[in-house]
């Protein structure tokens, strides 16, 4: 799984998100890998008919109806969104909300990608059986220093913790990944995919960097 979080970067503002998603579609088809993109929330509808997975960056434990400003999973599904990131380091939520949202997305047959900061959180939440757990040490996010190089033991321990949960959860690796070499190392250490943001979004050539990452995954 190759997940790209667009955050609220200016590089994909407006109709630039369409070009970005089309590039990802081409790479996904060429290398036969699963690519998922989380656009800024207000741009989801622009690309929701994509042939690749479109995910929300955040979802709220809120109901359909009079809930102004909240992101409601049931309505995301009706807009062809396939799932959501949960508890990203830039949008942390409570343990209670995490549990409810994983359960809600599972009930709706939507993908849950739970972001955690360390191995202790992997162990704590793996029992909830999210589809993916993405480990991202906050200090390395956007740093250009890949967790696979800076803290390889973290990925190995996280992979072991996920394995010990004995369910269907898969590990993703994030934070500071900027090259195909970083991707290869993460896979070698036990990750089943990657969660990236600025390493892709801020690259001068999206096609080239996505190709580099994709090749390293296959």
Image (spheres, rainbow, N blue to C red):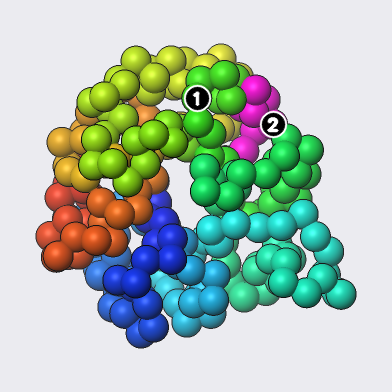
Q: Residues within 10 Å of mark 2 (few under 14, many from 20)?
A: some
Marks 1 and 2 sit apart, C-alpha to C-alpha, by: 16 Å
Q: Residue at x 19, y 60 (%)?
A: 203
Residue 34 in sight from this viewpoint: no
Q: Which residue is under mark 2?
A: 128
Of helix, strand and loop, which one carries label 1? Answer: loop
Reply above or below: 49 against 82: below
Total count of labels: 2
Residue 3 rendering spot, x and y as whole percentages: 39, 51
Q: Nearer the viewer, residue 202 or 130?
A: 202
Q: Residue at x 39, y 83 (%)?
A: 14
Q: Position of residue 215 (x, y in %)?
A: 17, 46
| Residue 118, numbered label | 1
Residue drawn at point x = 46 percent, y = 21 percent: 158
Q: Is residue 191 magenta?
A: no
10 Å neighbourhood of mark 1: few (<14), some, or many (≥20)? some
The mark closer to the camera, 1 or 2, is 1
Highlighted range, magenta: 124-130
Q: Residue furthest bottom?
A: 15
- Residue shown at 55%/61% (left/top)? 56
Q: Are discs 1 and 2 less than 8 Å apart at CB? A: no
Judging depth in this view, the residue of 204 and 23 nearest the camera is 204
């Amino acid at each position: 799984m190759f997940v790209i979080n667009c955050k609220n970067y200016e590089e994909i503002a407006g109709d630039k998100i369409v070009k970005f998603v089309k590039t990802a579609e081409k790479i996904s088809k060429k290398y036969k890998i699963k690519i998922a993109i989380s656009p800024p929330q207000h741009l989801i509808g622009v690309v929701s008919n994509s042939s690749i997975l479109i995910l929300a960056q955040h979802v709220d434990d809120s109901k359909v109806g009079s809930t102004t400003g909240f992101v409601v999973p049931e309505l995301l599904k009706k807009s062809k969104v396939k799932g959501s990131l949960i508890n990203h380091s830039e949008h942390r939520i409570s343990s209670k909300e995490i549990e409810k949202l994983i359960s809600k997305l599972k009930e709706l047959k939507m993908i849950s990608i739970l972001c955690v900061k360390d191995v202790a959180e992997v162990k704590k939440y793996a029992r909830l059986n999210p589809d993916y757990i993405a480990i991202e040490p906050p200090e390395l996010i956007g740093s250009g220093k890949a967790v696979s190089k800076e803290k390889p033991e973290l990925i190995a321990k996280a992979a072991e913790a996920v394995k010990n949960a004995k369910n269907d959860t898969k590990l993703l690796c994030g934070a500071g990944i900027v090259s195909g070499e970083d991707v290869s190392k993460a896979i070698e250490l036990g990750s089943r995919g990657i969660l990236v943001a600025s390493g892709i979004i801020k690259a001068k050539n999206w096609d080239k960097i996505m190709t580099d990452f994709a090749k390293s995954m296959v």
